[in-house]
Amino acid sequence: HLKGEPLALPRFSRPPAQPSAKADDLEQFIAAYRRDKAQAAAPGAIASAAPAAAPAASAALAAATIKPKTSFLAGPNKLLFLVLRAALPDHQIFPNVRLADAVQIAGQPPTPQQRAQLAQARVDFVICNKELGVVALLDVTDGNRADDVLKRQLEPQITGAGGRYLRVAPNAIPKPAEVRALVCGA
């Protein structure tokens, strides 16, 4: 448990869910987990990691109007996510992931600057197998992103370790069969 003053966050209300005749076990498990978690926690209280900053952050959040996004992904990223799901039903697809969470540095310990670069760089999609092993990293880019240089430097290392780093142009999203061939090499 993190210690500190509780931070009150707004709670989002969801419209009542329509009962589904084909609700699978996973959805029931997730719903039960959320229900148990909500009952165990005090309403609206979350422990803060920084006790000194908690009152200021709490006041700023209370003054702000917060609402969920209408769509988590948009444009080419949304289209590519849907293509990836269709092409790779036996894989897990995670959008907007920190590069540091998808790669592991072997050998010499990274310098503080290298750690900072990895922590700030993001990958549009991480594709994992059923065991959640990283299979491929995929970016939607036209080559002008700030972290493209870092990723080009890391690409040979990722490929040499058995992974794949793929770049897709926003105006050239591949078809599902092409995606499967790119990611799985088949």
Image (tube, helix red, strand yellow):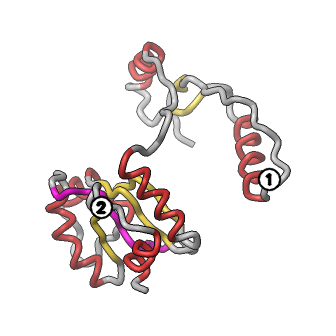
Q: Residue 172 shows which numbered tag?
A: 2
**Residue 39: x percent and y percent?**
75, 35
Left or right side of 23 for 117: left
Is there a contact, CB below 8 Å, between mark 2 and mark 1? no
Residue drawn at the location 26% of the way across and 54% of the way down: 121
**Residue 164: x percent and y percent?**
33, 76
Quadrant in which the C terminus is drawn: bottom left
Q: Residue 23 shows which numbered tag?
A: 1
Secondary structure under the numbered disc 2 in the rendered image:
loop
Residue drawn at the location 57% of the way across and 69% of the way down: 89
Task: Tell me which amino acid carries mark 1.
Answer: Ala
Left or right side of 53 for 47: right
Q: Relative to the observer, which residue lies in front, 70 or 9?
A: 70
- Against 141, residue 56 (above or below) is above
Residue drawn at the location 62% of the way across and 25% of the way down: 44
**Residue 29: x percent and y percent?**
76, 53
Q: Earlier in the sequence, mark 2 or mark 1?
A: 1
| Magenta highlight on residue 142 | yes
Which residue reaches farthest top?
Answer: 63
Q: Residue 160 shows which numbered tag?
A: none
Give the class, few, some or many, for how many residues have Cα within 10 Å of label 2's Cα (few <14, many ≥20): few
What is the quadrant of residue 47 in the picture?
top right
